[in-house]
Image: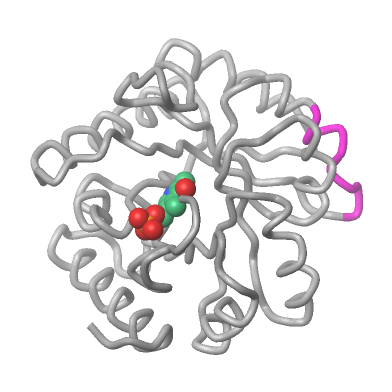
C-alpha cells in the first residue's frame, strides 16, 4: 500500500474495478464514497484533487467547516452518521444524500427543511440487518412503512438501503449479511419501490459487499489512514 491519499485512492479504485469484474457486476456500477469524518479539510482537498467526488461525513459540527472551505470544489456530500433532530436544518441545506434514515420524524423534518431551490435530498433507509440493539437502523418489518412515508415526501428521493452489518473477519459471514440487505431491497422493489442504491461495504469488507450487489461502498481508513480520534 502506498502512503499518500492519492496512491491509496488509486489502489481502492483498482480493487473496486477488480471486484466488479470478478463478481460480474456492470463496470462502473459501484461508486466510492470517501468517508472523511474527523479528517482535516486539507485531506479532503487532496482526495478531491485526485478526482474523488463523493465524500461522507458523520458529525455535522466536524463536517460544516469542510463543506464551507471546499465549496468551490466539485464535491458531493453524503451524511453517513446518526441524524440528530437539532441538526436536520443544516443537513438539509448542505448535503446531497443522507444514508441513515430510520425514523419517519427525521425524514419529515428533512423534507420540510430542504431548500426549495435544491433538488430532492437523496435518502437511504438504514437497515439494522444484524439486529444489534446497540446499532441504529430499523427492522425488516419497519422498512416498508418508512419507504411508503418517504415516497410521499416531495423534497426527498428514496434511493435504497444502507447497512452496517456486525463486524466479522469471516468473508462468508460478511457476504451472508450483505446478501440479506440485498434481499430486503429486492422485497421493496417487488412491492413497487424504484430503488437503485445499496450503500454497504467499508474498508475491511467492501469486496464482499460488491459481491452481494453494493452500489456505494463507504471507505475511510483505507484511503485516509487510521483515525486518531473517535470513530
Ligand atoms: C466510519 C464509517 C465508515 C468507514 O469505515 P472504515 O472502516 O474507516 O472504512 C463507513 N460507513 C460509516 C457509516 C462509518 O461510520
Q: Which residue is nearer to you in this view: 174 or 133? A: 133
**Residue under the point 31% across and 59% down:** 203
| 6 over 128 or under it: above or below | below
Return the x and y of residue 35 as percentages of the image width and height: 49, 61
In which quarter of the view is residue 73 placed?
bottom right
| 5 over 78 or under it: above or below | below
Does residue 116 show up magenta in the picture?
A: yes
**Quadrant the N terminus occupies:** bottom left
Return the x and y of residue 43 as percentages of the image width and height: 55, 79
**Residue under the point 42% across and 83% down:** 5
Q: Which residue is nearer to you in this view: 161 or 38? A: 38
| 10 over 203 or under it: above or below | below
Q: Is residue 217 visible?
A: no
Q: Residue furthest top?
A: 141
**Residue under the point 19% across and 51% down:** 208
How many callouts does the rendering have? 0
Return the x and y of residue 19 as percentages of the image width and height: 20, 65
Coloured how?
one colour
Left or right: where 179 falls relative to 131: left
In which quarter of the view is residue 157 placed?
top right
**Residue under the point 52% across and 36% down:** 194
Q: Is residue 89 visible?
A: yes
Residues in magenta, as a range: 109-117
Left or right: where 57 falls relative to 189: right
Does residue 143 show up magenta in the picture?
A: no
Left or right: where 195 falls relative to 64: left
Q: Residue furthest right?
A: 116
Return the x and y of residue 82 as percentages of the image width and height: 59, 37
Amino acid at each position: 500500500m502506498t502512503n499518500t491519499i492519492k496512491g491509496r485512492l488509486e489502489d481502492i479504485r483498482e480493487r473496486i474495478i477488480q471486484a466488479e469484474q470478478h463478481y460480474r457486476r456492470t463496470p462502473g456500477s459501484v461508486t466510492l464514497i470517501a468517508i472523511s469524518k474527523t479528517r482535516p479539510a486539507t485531506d479532503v482537498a487532496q482526495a478531491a484533487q485526485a478526482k474523488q467526488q463523493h465524500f461522507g461525513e458523520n458529525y455535522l459540527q466536524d463536517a460544516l467547516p469542510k463543506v464551507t472551505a471546499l465549496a468551490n470544489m466539485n464535491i458531493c456530500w453524503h451524511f453517513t452518521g446518526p441524524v440528530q433532530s437539532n441538526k436536520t436544518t443544516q443537513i438539509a441545506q448542505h448535503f446531497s444524500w443522507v444514508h441513515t434514515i430510520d425514523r419517519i420524524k427525521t425524514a419529515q423534518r428533512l423534507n420540510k427543511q430542504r431548500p426549495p431551490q435544491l433538488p430532492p435530498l437523496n435518502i437511504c433507509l438504514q437497515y439494522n440487518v444484524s439486529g444489534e440493539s446497540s446499532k441504529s437502523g430499523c427492522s425488516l418489518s419497519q422498512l416498508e412503512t418508512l419507504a411508503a412515508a418517504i415516497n410521499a415526501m416531495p423534497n426527498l428521493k428514496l434511493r435504497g438501503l444502507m447497512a452496517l452489518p456486525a463486524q466479522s473477519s469471516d468473508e462468508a459471514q460478511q457476504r451472508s449479511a450483505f446478501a440479506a440487505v440485498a434481499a430486503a431491497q429486492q422485497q421493496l422493489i417487488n412491492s413497487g419501490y424504484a430503488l437503485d442504491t445499496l450503500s454497504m461495504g467499508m474498508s475491511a469488507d467492501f469486496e464482499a459487499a460488491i459481491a452481494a450487489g453494493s452500489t456505494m461502498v463507504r471507505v475511510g481508513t483505507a484511503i485516509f489512514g487510521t483515525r486518531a480520534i473517535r470513530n
